[in-house]
Amino acid sequence: MISQNCDVLFAFGGAVNMPASRQTKDPQKRRGGGHLAWRILRIALLSYLGFLLLLKFFENRLVYFPSPWPDDHKSDIPEFLSEVTLQVDDGPVLHGWHLVHPRPRAHVLFLHGNAGNLAGRQSMLEDLHDSVGVDLFAIDYRGYGKSSGRPTEAGIIEDARLARRTYATTAGIPESEIILMGRSLGAGVAVTLAADDGARALVLQSTFTSLPDVAARQYPWLPVRWLMKNRFDSEANISRFTGPLLYSHSEGDTTLDISMGEQLFSAANEPKQFFRFAGRDHNDPQPREYLRVLLNFFDSLP
């Protein structure tokens, strides 16, 4: 918000031998200060509005940071990992992975955050497959990795819905048996799907209440709550999900403060569990004890 401090200027006259007759003041001098102040204010307002228009125009570039598939990505793909291709109705072709487990503890659709691609998450996915014993399906949203198109909120949610349908068909299970696991922005996608269509359970990692809430903390001087078109309003959506929830967040997260996770967790229904840990930042991997918590959570599901 721009505030204008209006100073009252006083002209003091006290010259020696001043004539007794009344002085005529120059109207141009009297108006000059006001004109200058208005000119400065107008420039500031126009600059502010111009900056808002730039933010509006480039919003998607400030929210989504997709990376193309790296040429030097390791080629030692395990036998249980197969590549999948998904065709979206509105055009994009998505790339994904299916990490097949012969006797899975659970079937999990993993939805990653707003940066990078699956290549940077291969070790984590393989660790979940091996250590927790789950069957995993993961995709790169449109515009990420090998997937074509450009990311938008509606587009990413559509991609996730297609991935869940494809996963259910491939695994031979109903969609309701799939656990949705989302990290950071991917948790916002998972909450939307669970709220709209249900899920066996929700597993959320290091996420937010809504994207405008994140932006408002970073840019408190901008009207981002009404400016942004990308919302991912997880706090409003999560109350519509009535299944089990496992939430985790680091106390040392400098990108998304843990207080946002606590606020989202408070809005969720029971049954729910909060796993907090220290010594990790937003992009650091979960601690090893998280795998035990995750395993126990999966075993407790009906």
Image: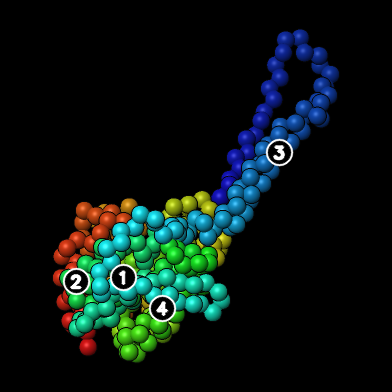
List the residue tagged with mark 3. Answer: 39
Gap between marks 4 and 1 measured at Cα: 18 Å
Residue shown at 21% from the left, 67% from the top: 127
Which mark is drawn over residue 204? 1
Look at label 3 and name its amino acid. Answer: Arg
Please tell me which residue lies in front, 295 or 144. Answer: 144
Say which amino acid is labelled 2.
Asp
The image's mark for residue 130 is: 2
The percent position of residue 287, horizontal first and vertical second, equals: 19, 61
Q: Residue at x 58, y 57 (%)?
A: 56
Instruction: Tell me if 97 is positioned left or right of 277 in this view.
Output: right
Q: Residue 161 appears in which quarter of the rendering?
A: bottom left
Q: Earlier in the sequence, mark 3 or mark 4?
A: 3
Label 4, secondary structure: give it.
helix
Figure disc tally:
4
Residue toward you, 302 or 116: 116
- Earlier residue among tags 4 and 1: 4
Quadrant in which residue 129 is drawn: bottom left
Q: CA distance from mark 3 to mark 1?
A: 51 Å
Q: CA distance from mark 3 to mark 4?
A: 55 Å
